[in-house]
């Protein structure tokens, strides 16, 4: 399962190290976005090419009815062939590499396949040879013009290099040789080092390391490389655990001299020709991020439209049944460990709300702070509906790990290993842990540990279908639960 997901961002090679497989880290998230935008642009220009061909051949803006099928089939077949010949993998705005040979192969292959289909469907005689030729030539010219135009624009803006993989380094002093080699190879292997921190042995190391991790988060690296010795790992274990919140591939060097025999069977990755061990995989792969964001925008907007009458009724009921504001905003940690303001319908009496950023008291059964209406809202999770605005704003997702109060994060990060890794993705209104019963008060470490385990399962196994499954389970049996109060 893991290797099947890795092939979206890695290329397998036989590097002769260990027994657990070896992969080459190659692409950044920005590169994936660029390729996807080019794929979308290719569809548009191919349709435009068909329109130009229609104007040249038939003197009409739209192709005649008999040519509509090939007009819309050609871009789809072209995309399929481009994926097969890896036509989008070779795009490089820095070197103006447009993959011309692959582009021509895809175009000629597309029209060859369409002509074969027309022949066997016995409709080839209905095709206009001139329209087909015009469409092929204009489409090819527009595809090339699109690539050259975009690359020239990127270079003039000085952002052509932004599509390189972004690498962050953290190492112990003295600097290990492999880190020195990695820095020396950055330019020749076309990646950018966006952050480099070396742990020094003095009383300020803890503070400087924590500051360095905050800077590393803001740099948004695609890959984090660790070369930290065992003493520093033990000394700064709590601080280094925060690296788990960075949404990137996490790799580190192997030190077999320290008895890490398990490394022999671990999964190896190659970066700039140097071997590293993978400790964490970037969530959602290359294009899962925009797929999930599109899912949030579309489904979130529909949900907000459908639920707006209910939300207006709840807002009115909150205002009429108790003194205070309709909405309550709580500071919580979100994506990348950043602080966000999560919206909820107020469910407690204002004069009994004792929460502060430093101390948050979880709601418990028969909590005297909760209003009568608030008890119903919390039991049915209707108090969470304003978080749809958080989703559309981009702070949250429809599905993901539930965001915890900042005070709870500071408490549990020291009790549960890997706790902060929940923040490698955006928090959600509902999640895998919630639909499996792990919701409500976490009055024991074991309850929180189970919630974290379910959250990590979701992050490692995400797919749009898993999101749909969780949302369906939420609608069927997830709103009302015995642990919700």
Image (cartoon, rainbow, N blue to C red):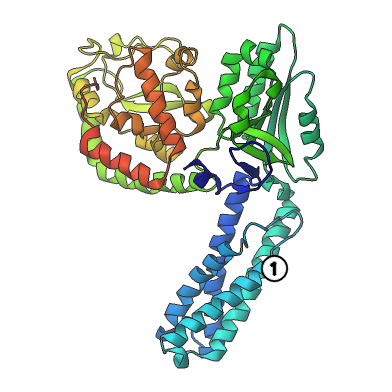
- Residue at the top extreme? 203
- Residue at label 1? 100
Where is the C terminus found, in terms of image quarters?
Answer: top left
Q: What's the residue at 79%, 23% (across, down)?
A: 175
Residue 410 visible (yes or no): yes
Which quadrant of the figure has residue 20?
Answer: top right
Image location (x, y in percent) of residue 415: 46, 12
Image location (x, y in percent) of residue 89: 64, 57
Q: With 164 as the anchor, is 242 left or right in this view?
A: left
Image location (x, y in percent) of residue 435: 29, 32
Which quadrant of the figure has residue 97?
Answer: bottom right
Q: With 127 as the anchor, is 385 left or right in this view?
A: left
Q: What's the residue at 80%, 30% (across, down)?
A: 180
Q: What's the residue at 63%, 45% (across, down)?
A: 28
Local packing at callout 1 (Cα closer than 10 Å; few below 14, some 14-19, many 20+) is: some
Q: With 32 as the anchor, is 100 left or right in this view?
A: right
Closest to the observer: 223 or 366? 223
Residue 300 visible (yes or no): no
Q: What's the residue at 67%, 16% (across, down)?
A: 230
Image location (x, y in percent) of residue 128: 51, 90
Closest to the observer: 263 or 160? 263
Closest to the observer: 276 or 29? 276
Closest to the observer: 447 or 274? 274
Q: With 479 as the anchor, is 21 left or right in this view?
A: right
Counting the numbered discs, the total is: 1
Q: Height in image: 482 above or below 164? A: above
Is disc 1 placed on a helix, strand or loop? helix
Q: Height in image: 436 above or below 355? A: below
């Amino acid at each position: 399962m893991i290797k099947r997901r890795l092939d979206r961002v890695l290329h397998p090679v036989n590097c002769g190290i260990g027994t657990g497989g070896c992969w080459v880290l190659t692409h950044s998230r920005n590169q994936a976005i660029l390729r996807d935008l080019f794929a979308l642009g290719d569809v548009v220009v191919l349709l435009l090419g068909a329109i130009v061909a229609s104007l040249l051949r038939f003197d009409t803006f739209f192709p005649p009815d008999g040519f509509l099928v090939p007009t819309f089939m050609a871009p789809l077949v072209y995309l399929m062939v481009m994926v097969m010949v890896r036509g989008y993998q070779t795009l490089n705005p820095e070197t103006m590499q447009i993959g011309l040979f692959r582009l021509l192969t895809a175009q000629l292959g597309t029209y060859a396949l369409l002509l074969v289909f027309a022949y066997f469907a016995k409709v080839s005689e209905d095709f206009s040879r001139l329209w087909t030729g015009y469409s092929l030539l204009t489409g090819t010219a527009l595809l090339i013009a699109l690539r050259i135009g975009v690359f020239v624009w990127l270079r003039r803006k000085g952002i052509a290099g932004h599509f390189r993989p972004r690498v962050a380094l953290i190492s112990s002093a003295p600097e290990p040789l492999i880190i020195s080699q990695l820095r020396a190879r950055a330019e020749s292997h076309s990646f950018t080092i966006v952050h480099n921190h070396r742990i020094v042995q003095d009383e300020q190391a803890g503070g400087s390391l924590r500051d360095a991790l905050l800077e590393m988060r803001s740099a948004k690296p695609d890959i984090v490389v660790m070369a930290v010795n065992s003493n520093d790992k033990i000394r700064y274990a709590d601080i280094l655990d925060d690296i788990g919140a960075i949404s990137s591939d996490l790799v580190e060097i192997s030190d077999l001299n320290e008895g890490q025999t398990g490394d022999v069977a671990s999964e190896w990755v190659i970066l700039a020709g140097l071997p590293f061990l993978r400790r964490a995989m970037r969530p959602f792969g290359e294009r899962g991020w925009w797929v999930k964001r599109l899912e949030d925008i579309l489904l979130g907007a529909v949900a907000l439209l459908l639920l707006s009458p209910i939300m207006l009724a709840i807002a009115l009921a909150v205002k009429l049944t108790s003194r205070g504001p309709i909405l309550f905003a709580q500071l919580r940690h979100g994506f990348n460990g950043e602080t966000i303001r999560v919206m909820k319908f107020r469910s407690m009496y204002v004069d009994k709300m004792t929460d502060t950023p430093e101390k948050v008291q979880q709601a418990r059964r028969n909590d005297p702070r909760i209003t009568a209406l608030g008890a119903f809202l919390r039991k049915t999770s209707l108090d969470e509906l304003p978080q749809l605005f958080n989703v559309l704003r981009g702070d949250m997702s429809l599905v993901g790990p539930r965001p915890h109060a900042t005070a709870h994060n500071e408490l549990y990060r020291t009790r549960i290993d890997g706790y902060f890794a929940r923040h490698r993705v955006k928090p959600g209104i509902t999640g895998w842990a919630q639909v499996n019963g792990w919701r409500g008060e976490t009055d024991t470490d074991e309850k929180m540990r189970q919630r974290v385990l379910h959250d990590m399962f979701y992050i490692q196994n995400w797919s749009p279908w898993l999101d749909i499954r969780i949302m369906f389970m939420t609608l069927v049996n997830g709103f009302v639960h015995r642990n919700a109060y």
